[in-house]
Image (cartoon, rainbow, N blue to C red):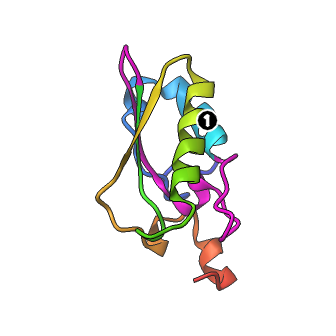
Amino acid sequence: MTDQKELNYPIWDIDDTHPNKVEEFRNAFRQVRDPEIGMNLIQLGLIRNVSISDENIQIVMILTTPYCPYAPMLMESARKKAESVMDLPAEISYGREVWNQSMMEDDTSLSWGLF
């Protein structure tokens, strides 16, 4: 089995608090594709953290570029997918990290010559 480090997944808060939900969230976020690049949020490493409180789901997300024309659509789609996993409202905040290729799920995408 491939482990989290091998796939370059960020460690989310729910890895500790709700480990039974991690794969559900990953699978939900895999359904959101960047229409320009053609890869999903998990492949690109854009979901930097997911945490759950009694009141809501908090998601920290970054974009491949600060001026991404699809930012509102991507963030809203991620929010809706998170809410489909758990019956809680979700909030998305824009992370401070600057995206780079090393955040991608695995190194196979680097050899595709996308960037």
Mark 1: amino acid:
Lys
Q: Image quadrant for the C terminus?
A: bottom right
**Which residue does the image show at 46% across and 62% down from the upper left?**
63
Let me know if residue 105 appears in the view: no
**Which residue does the image show at 35% across and 20% down from the upper left?**
53
Q: Nearer the viewer, residue 110 or 37?
A: 37
Label 1: how many residues lie within 10 Å, few (<14), some (14-19) or many (20+)?
many
Q: Which residues are magenta?
A: 30-56
Residue 100 placement (x, y as % from top left): 43, 73
Residue 40 placement (x, y as % from top left): 64, 56
Residue 30 placement (x, y as % from top left): 66, 48
Q: Main secondary structure of the magenta part?
A: loop
Let me know if residue 55 appears in the view: yes
Q: Can you say whether 53 is above or below 80 in the image?
A: above
Q: Can you say whether 81 is above or below 47 in the image?
A: above
**Secondary structure under the numbered disc 1 in the rendered image:** helix
The residue pinned by badge 1 equals 81
Q: Nearer the viewer, residue 102 or 97?
A: 97
**Which residue does the image show at 71% across and 66% down from the upper left?**
38
* Residue 95: in magenta span: no
Q: Is residue 81 left or right of residue 60?
A: right
